[in-house]
Amino acid sequence: MKKVIILFMACMLLFTSSSFADNSSNDDSSDSTVTKSDEQKEARFIKIHEDESFVYLLDKKDSGWIRRPYSAGEYIIDAWIKMIPYSYSASVNYNSSEIYDKYYLEHYLIDPANKKIQFLCELEVSGRPDNNIRQRPYYVGNWEGLVPGSVEDSIYHSVVKIMGTKKGSSGIKGKLGDFIEDVFRISI
């Protein structure tokens, strides 16, 4: 019964603080009639690396922490990287809905705890990507160590810098479900 009461109080505290934050942000915006521009909204794509061939962008919307397959409590980063050819990258707004002539998407798993990376697939995209990708399944033997100076080394360090070294360490507020899951995992 004590656990239920504590959980209820924590939920009420979260809802109260989030509604207070929402109301205070609405009060600030009521003074001006200008809406937020695309630059003021949170960016979906973050530039993480650049070389003579490509500009590498992390897709924050579709990347995040996932449970390591076949593990109860370990988490790894699931990262989607968009690679735009350098030849026209200077004139591109990375966060617009513009469809590029040709770009690549790479899918990685990143293990900050063991400093490893696992490549799952690469898609060559002309126009819009299809959702019929074929990628390698997760396999513990596919983890690779980092080679200093390699593209994977740069991707690893940039993604870890943005996402943090463990779930919840990036400073981004977790979801209520994650909080409730953590409360019950601690108490059991």
Image (cartoon, rainbow, N blue to C red):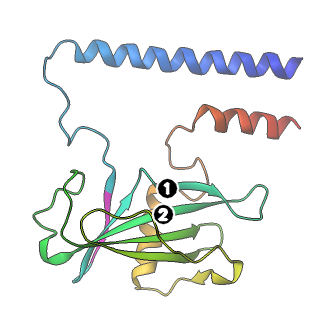
The x and y percentages for residue 85 are 21, 76
- Label 1, residues with CA under 10 Å away: few <14, some 14-19, many ≥20: many
- Report the magenta stretch's main SS: strand
Residue at screen point 61% across, 31% down: 176
Q: Considering the numbered disc 1 on the image, is that residue within a helix, a strand or a loop?
A: helix
- Residue numbers of the magenta segment: 46-50
Residue at screen point 56% across, 61% down: 77
Q: Are marks 2 and 1 in contact (CB under 8 Å)?
A: yes
- Label 2, residues with CA under 10 Å away: few <14, some 14-19, many ≥20: many
Residue at screen point 38% across, 57% down: 59
Choose the circle earlier in sequence order: 2 or 1.
Answer: 2
Q: Compared with residue 183, is residue 29 higher up or lower down, i.e. above or below?
A: above
Residue at screen point 80% across, 35% down: 184
Pair 2/1: label in front = 2
Nearest the camera: 71 or 13? Answer: 71
- Looking at the rendered structure, which numbered label has been put on residue 163? 1
Residue 180 position by quadrant:
top right
The x and y percentages for residue 36 are 20, 31
- The amino acid type found where label 2 is placed reads Ala
Residue located beneath label 2 in the image: 79
Nearest the camera: 115 or 185? Answer: 185
